[in-house]
Amino acid sequence: MDLAKYGPWALIVGGSEGAGAAFARKLASDGFKLVLTARKTGPLEDLAAELRGQGAEVRTLSADLKQLDVLDQVRKITDDIEVGLLVFHAGANDTRGNFVELPREVTQGVIQITVVGQSDFARHYGGLMCQRRRGGMILCGSLSSYMGAASLAAYTAAKAYSRIFSEALWSECGAFGVDVLHLNVGFTGTPAMARLGMDISQAQSPDDLAQEGLDNIANGPVWIAGGEANWERARQRSVIDNRREAIEKFATPPRDVMEEKE
């Protein structure tokens, strides 16, 4: 990564484990100073200690992205530094069910993190980057953003917002020398997926995902990670004719069906 263009500080939202941690390790090796924020204090501080042991300067904040004032909390440890790279990797889904049956706080939390949170962070840090005429943002989404799916209504809709938002932001910020990439994530072998009991043996590794994002930050507005198979899934889910048939055939299946197929 170009430290002169995207440094000296990188802010990783959702940076305690999985791909977030992979982003942190790769950026630290390139000389970036890091701000890491995530909900779980233990993994966050373990990663920070690891990186500091390798000579990196690291700031951390344990924060719940579902809270309305989370940006204000993060600003307390970033307002005195120059954040030239924002990686917004938060927004995994751990609860599935029919939208009308799930508690409002569950679906609202998904929207708060992926729609409101991502927008607020991009507005603040992207605005500063545009003023400086340099910088970059990697906003992570999901392959599921191309089609609504039963038991994932709020999640798929929020990820669709993230993708379309990133495309518009890419168009706007490019005039100011700021790169925006929507990193469209497929099935990735993260600790979160492992905790859900998923078979991650065939999943893309967090390390490979992070490398794809960093390698393609200037190739926006959208990069579909994970190879041609994921590109083809996006194509299949993007057809506009006969959406009923397309959804029945290509939508993300319920988790128990996915497990039966594996």
Image (cartoon, rainbow, N blue to C red):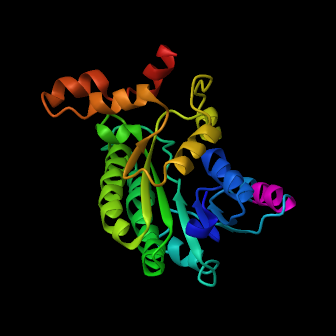
Is any part of residue 167 visible from this angle?
yes
Of helix, strand and loop, which mostly describes the magenta segment? helix
What range is drawn magenta here?
45-53
Tally of marks: 0
Camera-nearest residue between 155 and 52: 52
Who's the residue at 36% across and 65% down the image?
174
Residue 158 coordinates in the image, percent (x, y) = 35, 51
Give the farthest residue toward the left.
241
Give the farthest residue toward the top.
261
Decide if residue 38 is on the left or right side of residue 120. right
Who's the residue at 67% across and 50% down the image?
21
Position of 116 relative to 199 (above/below): below
Camera-nearest residue between 161 and 196: 161
Q: Locate residue 38: give its quadrant.
A: bottom right
Q: Locate residue 3: give its quadrant.
A: bottom right
Is any part of residue 97 visible from this angle?
no
Residue 80 coordinates in the image, percent (x, y) = 63, 84
Who's the residue at 53% across and 71% down the image?
70
Residue 148: within the magenta? no
Position of 233 relative to 34 (above/below): above
Who's the residue at 30% across and 62% down the image?
171
Give the farthest residue toward the bottom.
80
Residue 50: within the magenta? yes
Residue 151 coordinates in the image, percent (x, y) = 36, 36
Q: Quadrant of the N terminus?
A: bottom right
Decide if residue 15 is on the left or right side of residue 242. right
Residue 230 coordinates in the image, percent (x, y) = 41, 30
